[in-house]
Amino acid sequence: MDISAPVAADEVVRRARTELGIDLDFEPRDEGFSAMLALDNLPHPPPERAQALLPALIRRVEACHWRGRYRFFPTVREFAADTDCTALAAAGLHRHHALRPSRLAASARELLAAGAPESSARDGLLPGAVMVYWEDGAEPLARPRGRKHDAVVSANVLRTLHLAEQHDSHEGRRTVDATLRHVEDHLRSGRYLGGTRYYPSPAAFLHAVARLCGVCHDCATRLGPLLRNACAALPAPTNALDLALFIICAETCAAPGDRHGHRAELAGRQRPDGAWPAHAYFRTGRVPIYFGSAHLTTVFALRALGSDSSKPPEPHRTHAPGRAGAPRPDPWGAR
């Protein structure tokens, strides 16, 4: 289906039937993933005008919870919980102190249990790396989704594992190492330029890697130079959403470029009502339905234009610090 312009949910249902011959068994507007993304990217504490939105986002995300996992559609049991929803929901709730440490750790353990089995190598998967869906039969009403990786999902999962401090456990090390290899290979190979199964824009992948590097010093050391080169080589996107993601990533990893010009261009795309225009950010897999909204673009635009987005964040410690007072190495390498 043509995604050059946003359409309402009812129009999506109609066009899926007429253009693809598919009767959707879900209502697109019922998805909870947009709330997870917004919660995970909303500053804490939120700006004054957004404070009333925070409780509603938390309730929406909590409605998607199921036994330590989170679902894309909170009420459609045929859609299984997935690792992307789980990673982003847990990270967002954690960001706003709405998740007990025990629940964060429980979700992290679920993520670690989603590593691809050894037999998946014959299907082109990387054994040990986190898959998008679990294969443990825990949701008997859910349709099988098949074994698959998505590099943006892998980066999101790794970030949540580091936030939960579950990345270095004995049972999790194999999964973490394999998942990081998957992210690194996707970045090094340039395959991100074609998007991923669930994220059509290369900027979405680069943004996810930048956020991972922001909480993992070792990841920043390993991926930072590759990420900076990728940002420097990628032309600035032409739509507001991808431009915001690009700005956040480029400023985080100190990539060369016209940062002032990019920020001015993004600011100039703000609509008279104060929001930024909608654009596709993520999509479903088998049926190509793209999701985005002015609200979601606005969350990313505000982050891109925020005063704290122009400097790399302090990475989360993943190893014992050196002697007191010793300077820490720059995880991004020479700039």
Image: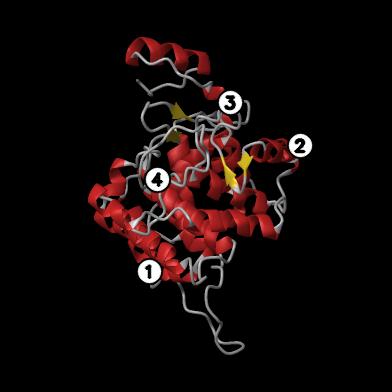
Structural distance between the alpha carbons of marks 2 and 4: 30 Å
Please state the horizontal and vertical placement of residue 16, each as a whole percent of the image: 39, 16
Q: Which disc number belongs to residue 222?
A: 1
Which is nearer the N-term, disc 2 or disc 1? 2
Q: Which disc number belongs to residue 30?
A: 3
Which is nearer the N-term, disc 1 or disc 4? 4
Q: Is residue 263 visible?
A: no
Residue at image position (52%, 78%) is 319
The amino acid type of the residue labelled 3 equals Asp
Q: Nearer the viewer, residue 295 or 101?
A: 101
User: Mark 4 — residue?
Assistant: 203
Q: Nearer the viewer, mark 1 or mark 4?
A: 1
Structural distance between the alpha carbons of marks 2 and 3: 21 Å
Which is nearer the N-term, disc 2 or disc 4? 2
The amino acid type of the residue labelled 4 equals Ala
- For label 2, the SS is loop
Residue at image position (51%, 18%) is 9
- For label 4, the SS is helix
Image check: 279 left or right of 236? right
User: Mark 2 — residue?
Assistant: 52
Task: Tell me the crowding category of disc 2: few under 14, some 14 to 19, or many 20 or more residues within 10 angstroms, Cα based.
Answer: few
Structural distance between the alpha carbons of marks 4 and 3: 26 Å
The amino acid type of the residue labelled 1 equals Arg
The amino acid type of the residue labelled 2 equals Ala
